[in-house]
Amino acid sequence: MIEVAIVGGTGYTGIELLRLLARHPKVRVKVITSRAEAGLEVAELFPSLRGHLSLAFSPPSVDVLTECDLVFFATPHGVAQAMMAALIDRGVRVVDLSADFRLRDADIWARWYGQPHGSPELIERAVYGLPEVNREQIREAQLVACPGCYPTAVQLGLLPLLEQELVDPASLIANAASGASGAGRQAKIDNLLAEVADSFKAYACGGHRHLPEIEQGLRAVQPERAVPAQVTFVPHLLPVVRGIHATLYATAIAATGDLQALFEERYAGEPFVDVLPAGQHPQTRSVKSSNMCRLSVFQPQQRDTVVVLSVIDNLTKGASGQAVQNMNIMFGFAEEAGLDHVALLP
Amino acid sequence: MIEVAIVGGTGYTGIELLRLLARHPKVRVKVITSRAEAGLEVAELFPSLRGHLSLAFSPPSVDVLTECDLVFFATPHGVAQAMMAALIDRGVRVVDLSADFRLRDADIWARWYGQPHGSPELIERAVYGLPEVNREQIREAQLVACPGCYPTAVQLGLLPLLEQELVDPASLIANAASGASGAGRQAKIDNLLAEVADSFKAYACGGHRHLPEIEQGLRAVQPERAVPAQVTFVPHLLPVVRGIHATLYATAIAATGDLQALFEERYAGEPFVDVLPAGQHPQTRSVKSSNMCRLSVFQPQQRDTVVVLSVIDNLTKGASGQAVQNMNIMFGFAEEAGLDHVALLP
Amino acid sequence: MIEVAIVGGTGYTGIELLRLLARHPKVRVKVITSRAEAGLEVAELFPSLRGHLSLAFSPPSVDVLTECDLVFFATPHGVAQAMMAALIDRGVRVVDLSADFRLRDADIWARWYGQPHGSPELIERAVYGLPEVNREQIREAQLVACPGCYPTAVQLGLLPLLEQELVDPASLIANAASGASGAGRQAKIDNLLAEVADSFKAYACGGHRHLPEIEQGLRAVQPERAVPAQVTFVPHLLPVVRGIHATLYATAIAATGDLQALFEERYAGEPFVDVLPAGQHPQTRSVKSSNMCRLSVFQPQQRDTVVVLSVIDNLTKGASGQAVQNMNIMFGFAEEAGLDHVALLP
Amino acid sequence: MIEVAIVGGTGYTGIELLRLLARHPKVRVKVITSRAEAGLEVAELFPSLRGHLSLAFSPPSVDVLTECDLVFFATPHGVAQAMMAALIDRGVRVVDLSADFRLRDADIWARWYGQPHGSPELIERAVYGLPEVNREQIREAQLVACPGCYPTAVQLGLLPLLEQELVDPASLIANAASGASGAGRQAKIDNLLAEVADSFKAYACGGHRHLPEIEQGLRAVQPERAVPAQVTFVPHLLPVVRGIHATLYATAIAATGDLQALFEERYAGEPFVDVLPAGQHPQTRSVKSSNMCRLSVFQPQQRDTVVVLSVIDNLTKGASGQAVQNMNIMFGFAEEAGLDHVALLP
C-alpha cells in the first residue's frame, strides 16, 4: 500500500484520478491540493465520490507532498515546473499529467507555451510516460511526464508503421476529435453546452500545442536514418463529454504486407492496446471509462494511403488512467491494477 | 464461486449484466442465450467486452440453464413466464429482470400487458426484489422479480413519506424522465438519434405499464389503515443514454418535522441509497454506471407540497445492478460485491 | 419600415432577435449595443449572421437609442431599470426582455432579485407582454415587459383551467425543463458541456425567480373571488440547447367536461398556440426555432389530476420571438410578420 | 407559382423539402406520395408542419405527378430509376435527390449499389446539380441529379485547388463527419440514440458509395491533361442530428500563393458559399437549417499540406436545400428564393 498526493485536484484529470484510485487495491490517496477549494470535502465538488472517499482539499505544501510515495500533478502547465525541483531533490517520485516535462527541448516548449520553461535542467530527468514505448525506463524513473491525450491516440496508431518504415514520414496526417472534457473544467464561454452541443468544428488548425509532442514521440521510434516524421495535425471538438478518435493517414512507401498482422504483433503483449478484427471500426464508447486504446488499420481501395483508426478515453488512457498505469509500472504493481474497468457501453 | 446464466443477452440489460459480472469476484457467467445471435461471440456484438469475457451466445435450453446456480432473465415480457415453471420445478434460483412476476395480480398484469399471464400460479412464489423493502424475503427466495427502472426511483423517493403517513396517499405525483436506453435495443424509428436527440417529450401520459407496479409497491409499505396510494405518473424521454430522474410531489397532511433527518434515518444502513445534504440537487451523472440511488427532499416556500428528487442509472440500480444486488443477497455475498463502481463523472 | 435598437446584443436573446429581425419585412435593426464588444462586427461573434446583416456593436447611448422607433432590452436584470426613465421620458417605445418590469410589486422584485428596484415608479407603466392575455393593452403600451421563458410555457398551459375555475388554485404544480441556452451566454463552469451534457437535474427547488412571475400571471386571469393561485415550481436543466417542456399538474374541483374542447376554444384564434389532437404529446423539437407553443391536456386514469403538457422554444416564444410578436402588435404589423418559421425538425 | 410533387415524402429529405417549400414564395406543394402512409395528414407525422401545410400523403401515380411542373424524388436509390422514363417522356421536369442519376457510368453505379442500373439510357440526360459548377446546364435541364451530402461538402472545398492545379490530385484526403439524420429515417438498431449518442466512429472506411461520386465530380473540374483526382474518403458518424464537416487534405505541388484570395475569388458571386476570414474555423451550427456552405483554408506550419474545412447542413445544402436551389435555377426564380434562412445559432 502506497500513499499518494494529487496536486491540483479540482479539474477533470483530478476527479478521474480519484475515481480510479478510490478502487485501486494498492493505493491510498493521502493528500489532494487546491488553493481555491482548500477545506472543501472532495465529495462536495464531485458527488460521484460520495461514499467512496473521505478527503478534503488542502493548500499545496511541499512538506506534506514529500511525505507521500508518489505525487501526481493534475495542474495547468507551469505549475509542476515551479514545484518540481523541491520534490525531486527530496527523492519524491512524480507523475506529471501536465505538459511541463513532455518536450525534450526547452526552447520548443517555450515557443509553444508562450513562456520560458521553469525547470529546463530537470527535463532530462523526465521519462516520457508512454508504456508501449518506454516501459523499462518508466520502471526506474523518478519523474514521468504523462503524454497528452491526442499524442497518446496518435502515437499508438502510427508507431507500427514508422517503426517498420512502411510509410512516408514526411506526410503524415492526424485528424483527431476530442470530447469537451479535454478542454478542462474552466469557465469559458467557448465550452458552454449551448455553444458546442449539436455542433462540430475543427480548431487550432494553424498549430496546436500537441503537434511538437506528437512529432517528437514519433521521431523517437523511427530508425535513425529515417526522414524525421512530420505531421499535419487537425483537432476537432466533439459534442460529447469523453472520448478521442484519431483518423490517421500515411502514404505507403513499401509493400505494406499484412498490416493487420503487423499491428496485432506489435501490440500482442500490451494490456491496454486492442487491435480490432480486420474490417471493424472502433467507437469511442467502446473505451469510455476504460484505459483501453482500440485500433483498426485499413488500406482503402488497395491504394497507397494507409488509414489507422485509434480511440481512447481522453481522461483515462489519455490522462489519468495512463498516469495510474505509469504508477503501477514504477512501483511494480500489476500493470492493470485499478484499471480493469469494462468500458461503459451503452 | 457460482455459475450463472443470462437468458436473452443481446439487449441493454444483458450487456449491463455482463459488464457487472465480468468483474464480480464470486461469479462466473457460464451461459448466455440468444436465439437470433446463437454462435456469435459476445464481444463481437459488444466490443467493450473484448478482453474481459470469452463467451458465445447459445440457443436457450432448459437443460443447460438448470446446471447453473442462478438464471437471470433479461428478456422482453412473456418469455420468463413461459420458461419459469420448468426452472422452478428443478430447483433453479431465478432473478427475473422483466416485468413478468412484478405484479401480484395476474388480471392486472394481463390488462396492462395485453395478454394473459403465462404462469399465474407462480406469482405468489415471486419476491419483489427491492432490497430496501424486502431484503429478508429476498435472502430465501427462489424467484426474485426485479423492479422496473421507474418504479425503483419512484418508490425509493416516496417510501419514507408513506411509511410515516406524512403525506396524502391519494394525490401523489411522479414526474420522471429516462434516458433512451430504457426503451431497449430494438429497431424503432421513434428511438433513432435523429428523432430524439436535441428534444424532450412526455409519453404514455394516459397510462404507462409501470403505474400499477408503482402503486402496488407503495401500498405494500403503507400502514394497513391508510388510504391506498394513488399516483399520477408521467414519464418523459431524455436525450441521454443512461439515467432516470424522478421528481416526486406529495401533499403534507401532518407536521412534516425534519424531513432531511427522516430520509437520512430511513436509509442509514443502505449501501445503495444516498441522501444528499440538505439543499443539494442530485444529477443523473452522479450515479451513472453505479448502483446508487441519490435522493433529496425539499419543502419549497414552506408550503404543503413536499418535493423529493431521486436519481438512478436505469440500467444499473434500475435493472442489472439491482439484479446483481439481489443475487448477492440470495447467495450471502457481500451486498456490494461487484457493485462498488464510482459513478462516471464527468 | 421601422428602425429598432437592441441594447445588450451579445447574449442569446440578442442573437435570436437578430436572427428574427434580419428577415422581418417591416424592420431594420439600426443599432445594437455592447460595452464589451463595441466596434466588433456582429457577424464576427455570430457567424450564422454572415451575409444577412452588416452591423457593428456600439456603446450604449441614450441619444442614439431615442432616434429609434423601438428599443429592445436584451440585458441582464437591472440594466433596463437604470436606463428606462430617460427613454420613456423621450417617448421611445420599449420591449424589455429582461425581468426588470415583469413584477407589479417592487418589494417582491427586490426580494427575489436581491437588490432594490431601480425604477419603481415606472412599473405601472409596463404592460405584461403575454399577447394571449393582454393583446389589447400591448397595442397601446409604451413599455412592454416580456414574460420569462418558464412563465410563458406555464401560463399558457394553465390559463384555461384557472379562467374556468376547474382546478384547485392552491395546489398547482409546474414541473419544467429548459435547454441550456436558458442559462445565458456567460462563462460559468456549471454550464460547460462537460458538466451538463449526458446528465439531467432539478435546480432551484427551494425557489426560482420565475415563481412570483408565474403566480402573478396566473392570479391575473383568475376570477376575483378565487383563491389565489399557488404553484410549486421545479425547474430542471435539459442537456439540449433550446426548448422548454412544462408538465403541469392540477387537481380538478369540478366536473372537467371536455378539456380538449376547452383548450381548443380558448386558443382558437391564437396564431402561436397550437392545441394538439387528443392523445398526442408535444415534443420540444416540434417548436424549435419557431414562435409556437404546443399544448396537450390529459386526465390520466380518469382520476382527479389534470395534466397539461406545454412546449416552447425558450429563445423564441420564451424570449425574442415573443418580443417580436409584441412589437408587431404595438406597431400594427401582422402578428406573424417575421415569425412564420416552420420549426426545425429533425 | 408552380406546382410541385414530392415522391417519397416520409424521410428526412422529404420533411426538409416541405419545411423549405412551405415558405417558398413561388411554389405550392400539390402532391406528396408515400405508399406506407397514404391517407395520413403530413402534419400527423411531422408535427412541426402543423399550421403550415394541409396535405395528405397519397400513393404514387405517374398520372398525378405529370400534372405538376416539377417532381422531386426523395426516395431510396432505385425508385427514381424505375419511374423516370415515364416522367421524362411526358416532359415533366425532375429533381432527383437520390443517388440514381449521379454517376455517369452505369457499370460503376451497379458495382457500388449492388444492382443493375434501371435506366442507363437516361443517365446522359441528367445534369449533376451542383450549381457552383453546372449552373448553366441546370437552367435548361429536364432531369437534375442532386449531389450527395458528403460530395457537396467535399467538392466545394477542393474545387478551387484542383481547378488551379495547385495540389497533387493523386493523394487527396477527405475526412468527413455527418450528423445522424444522414442515415435516414429508417428503423435500424445502429442508429438508435442509445447506440450512437455520446460516441463517435468512422464507418465504411473500406469504401463508401459517395467515393465514386466525389472522384467523378472532382475530375470534371480538372484540366484535361491532369492526373485524375483520387481520394481517400473516410466518413464518420457525429452524435448530432444535422451537419456535415469535411476536413480536406491535399499536397501542394506548386507555389500556392494566396489561398485565401483564391477561395474568395472563386466563390465571390455564389449566394450559398461563404469563405470565412483567414484563420477562422467553420462550425456546423453556423449553417444549421440554412443552405450555406462555409469554408476555410489553411496551410499549417507553412508546410506542403493544404487543409480545407467545409461545413454544410446535410439536409439543406446537402440535400433538400440544394434541390430547391436547383429548382430556382431551372424555373428562373431568384436563386435564394425560399432559402434565405439565417442559420439556427445557438
Image (spheres, coloured by chain):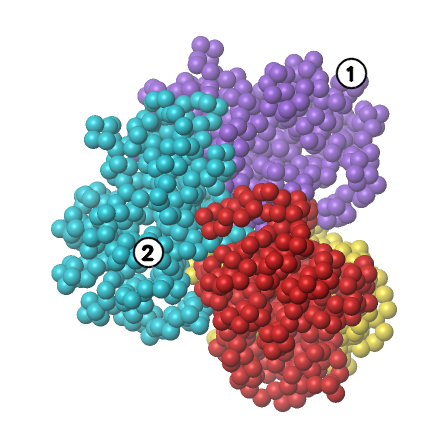
Chain colours: A cyan, B red, C yellow, D purple
Chain letter for mark 2? A
Specify the amino acid type for callout 1.
Asp
Of tags 1 and 2, which is closer to the observer?
2
Task: Name the image quarter holding the N terminus of chain D.
Answer: top right
x and y percentages locating residue D215 in the rendered image: 51, 21
Q: Which mark is residue D89?
A: 1
Q: Using the image, determine if residue A15 lies above or below residue C215.
A: above
Question: On the image, which quarter does residue C174 sit in?
Answer: bottom right
Please report the residue visible at 47 percent of the width from the left and 59 percent of the height from the top. B23
Q: Nearer the viewer, residue A315 or B93?
A: B93
Q: Using the image, determine if residue D22 lies above or below residue B242.
A: above
Please report the residue visible at 62 percent of the width from the left and 74 percent of the height from the top. B140
Specify the amino acid type for callout 2.
Ala
x and y percentages locating residue D46 in the rendered image: 72, 46
Residue holding disc 2: A334
Say what secondary structure mark 2 lies in: loop
Q: Is D79 positioned to the left or the right of A267 in the image?
A: right
Q: Nearer the viewer, residue C2 or D268?
A: D268
Determine the residue located farthest toward the top in the rendered image: D225
Q: Is residue D151 visible?
A: no
Say what secondary structure mark 1 lies in: helix
